[in-house]
Image (tube, rainbow, N blue to C red):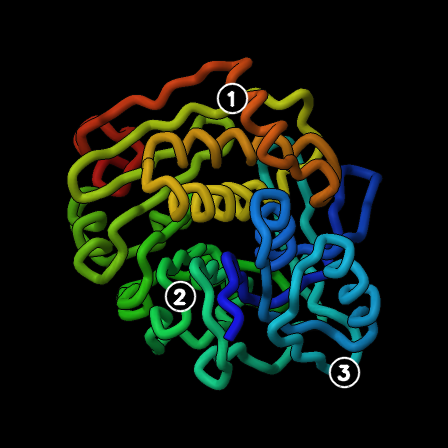
């Protein structure tokens, strides 16, 4: 059996990016941004996804361009799930259309991978299974589990049960998503509940204000790298997690992996969609040029907008 280096799963979307009077359409979702970034860093990249039959041929052609192997593509009738992302300053309004009526269940598949990236868009991945049957390292992006669709608009929902983390090693979310975890009475309490549920690494991103990588023993503030320009912030979190997973699996160096991931995410925002995703040479060059350092913190030194301090 082939053992992949990196596998990502979740819906593929056809994103509509709206910036004022300008709009663009491009494939998106964690499976796109995560797998393309991974393909720039290692061989043996694969994905498991679902897509509308109208776009399946174009999608398969895209995967071949980046040498990404589809373990399974489940196609459904009609058009692909579409996210309409409207950006105004730093604020994003999301709407959705063409939502498929199917879930992604890995328990029916037979594959092995070193790292598994769970990237749900709309709670489509069946989570009550042991993902370590398929992977050594399992990472989850929380965003798709706290989204709900209300009359075509994407709204956030709260989470009160962390059962889905039982076989997750790395959990990534942004600050707003973290606030949706209603499982504790304070910031520290929520973090400890996360670690008790399964993960041993928590990543909290905060856009151009940097990110935090937290374990039970320490917390790191990771500064943001300066991009050459900012065009489209879509996919930055997916690129961050993908880069972190691959680097951490290969080095076991928490600080370096976080800096590498922060730097990688600074490239994808420089152009539309995934076109500016960088390889390791470009990422390491920018890391050397900007020479940023992470800072070790205690949990009590984390920002005042944690849930215990609002």
Q: Residue at x 41, y 48 (%)?
A: 173
Residue 184, compared with residue 136, is above or below; it is above
Q: Quadrant of residue 70?
A: bottom right
Q: Is residue 53 visible?
A: yes
Give the spatial CA distance, label 3 vs label 1: 45 Å
Q: Residue at x 42, y 61 (%)?
A: 157
Mark toward the start of the polypeptide (2 vs 3): 3
Q: Is residue 176 visible?
A: no
Residue extending farthest bottom: 108
Identify the residue under disc 3. 77
Q: Are marks 3 and 1 in contact (CB under 8 Å)?
A: no
Looking at the image, residue 233 sits to the left or right of residue 180; the answer is right
Give the spatial CA distance, label 2 vs label 3: 31 Å
Nearer the observer, disc 3 or disc 1? 1
Residue 38, compared with residue 223, is above or below; it is below
Q: Secondary structure at mark 1?
A: helix
Q: Residue at x 71, y 36 (%)?
A: 276
Q: Position of residue 25 (x, y in %)?
A: 80, 52
Nearer the observer, disc 2 or disc 3? 2
Mark toward the start of the polypeptide (2 vs 1): 2
Q: Secondary structure at mark 3?
A: loop
Q: Position of residue 174 (x, y in %)?
A: 42, 43
Identify the residue under disc 2. 135
Q: Which mark is residue 174?
A: none
Q: Position of residue 61 (x, y in %)?
A: 81, 63
Q: Which mark is residue 287?
A: 1
Looking at the image, residue 82 sits to the left or right of residue 293; the answer is right
Q: Secondary structure at mark 2?
A: strand
């Amino acid at each position: 059996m082939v053992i992949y280096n990196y596998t990502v799963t979740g819906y593929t979307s056809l994103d509509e990016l709206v910036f004022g009077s300008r709009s663009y359409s491009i494939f998106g979702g964690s499976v796109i941004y995560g797998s393309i970034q991974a393909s720039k860093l290692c061989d043996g990249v694969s994905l498991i996804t679902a897509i509308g039959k109208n776009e399946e041929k174009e999608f398969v052609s895209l995967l071949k361009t980046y040498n990404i192997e589809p373990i399974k593509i489940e196609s459904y009738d009609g058009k692909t799930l579409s996210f309409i992302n409207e950006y105004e300053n730093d604020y994003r309004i999301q709407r959705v259309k063409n939502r498929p009526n199917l879930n992604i269940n890995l328990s029916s598949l037979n594959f092995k991978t070193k790292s598994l990236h769970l990237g749900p868009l709309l709670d489509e991945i069946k989570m009550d299974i042991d993902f370590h049957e398929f992977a050594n390292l399992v990472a989850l992006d929380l965003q798709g589990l706290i989204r709900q669709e209300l009359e075509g608009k994407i709204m956030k929902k709260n989470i009160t049960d962390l059962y889905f983390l039982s076989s997750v090693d790395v959990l990534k979310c942004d600050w707003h998503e973290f606030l949706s975890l209603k499982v504790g009475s304070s910031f520290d309490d929520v973090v400890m509940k996360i670690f008790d549920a399964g993960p041993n690494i928590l990543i909290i991103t905060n856009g151009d204000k940097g990110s935090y990588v937290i374990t039970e023993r320490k917390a790191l503030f990771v500064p943001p790298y300066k991009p050459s320009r900012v065009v489209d912030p879509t996919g930055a979190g997916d690129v961050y997690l993908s880069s972190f997973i691959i680097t951490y699996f290969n080095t076991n160096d928490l600080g370096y992996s976080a800096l590498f991931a922060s730097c990688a995410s600074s490239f994808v925002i420089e152009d539309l969609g995934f076109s500016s995703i960088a390889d390791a040479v470009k990422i390491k060059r920018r890391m050397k040029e900007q020479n940023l350092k992470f800072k070790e913190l205690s949990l009590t030194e984390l920002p005042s907008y944690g849930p215990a301090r609002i």
